[in-house]
Image (cartoon, helix red, strand yellow):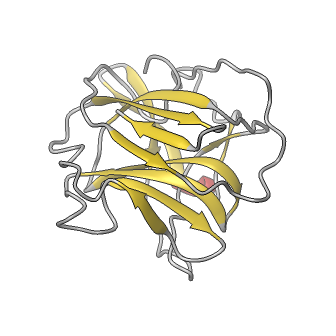
Amino acid sequence: MRGLNHWAVPGFAFVCLLATAVNLAHVPPAVRGIEFADDFQSGSLNAWQFPYPEDWVIGNDGGIHFLHMLRSREPLVPRRPIQFALLKGVSVGSFTFQSQVRRQKRSVLMVFDYVDSLHFYYTHLSVDSGTKQPVHNGIFIVNGGARRRIAGLDAAPALPDQKWHRIRVRREASSGAIEVF
């Protein structure tokens, strides 16, 4: 894994979505700047927090270490993602997040602007288009209720195969823009 990641190894970025998002009301103050990278070679997950830590391990694929979710869990009510990794003690406004990802089943999520389990944004990159599966392959907000799509319905499948892919999420807090490449 190179750069700021949840999953690992070289790949290629190819999908772009753009949204003007609703700002969450209770976002804590953001740090001025941070650069962070984790290649998971240390074997430690101390920099990360998880709703269910027992469901996460560091995997190894030919010497490349990566963060791996062992199992999914039933979604909460209102329906929203509940399995994700967050960098401990960090709250940012505008950011660029880069990672190498590989889906094991149908999709990969990236959670950001996390306030609590009922207030956050996420991107859902999937083998499905948003028109085929309305809760896949798009940008979503959880704002006190069930998840709501805010962009990407017509986007092509972002992860059409189970190879490694480079992704980038860019968030511009002042304008509300969210881009996924």
The structure residue drawn at horizontal position 37% and vertical position 21%, both measured from the top left corner, is: 64
User: Residue 95 at what x, y percent from top left?
Assistant: 60, 29
Residue 81: percent from the left, percent from the top?
51, 64
| Numbered-mark total | 0
Tell me, yes or no, if residue 46 can be seen here: yes
**Nearest the eye: 70 or 174:** 174
Image quarter (top left, top right, bottom left or bottom right) of the N terminus = top left
The residue lying toward the viewer, choosing from 47 and 180, is 180
Residue positioned most to the bottom: 77
Residue 180 placement (x, y as % from top left): 39, 38
- The relative height of residue 40 versus residue 129 in the rendered view (above or below) is above
For the point 19% across and 41% down, the residue is 162
Question: Which quadrant holds residue 12?
Answer: top left
Q: In this view, does 109 lie above or below 4?
A: below
Q: Residue at x 53, y 49 (%)?
A: 56
Counting from the top left corner in percent of width and height, residue 155 is at 23, 50
Residue 72 in sight: no
Decide which of 43, 134 is in the foreground and name it: 134
Q: In this view, does 24 lie above or below 85?
A: below
Left or right of residue 11, residue 6 in this image: right
Quarter occupied by the C terminus: top left
In the displayed orientation, state which residue is furthest to the right. 29
Q: Is residue 59 left or right of residue 13?
A: right
Residue at horizontal 55 percent and vertical 36 percent from the top: 171
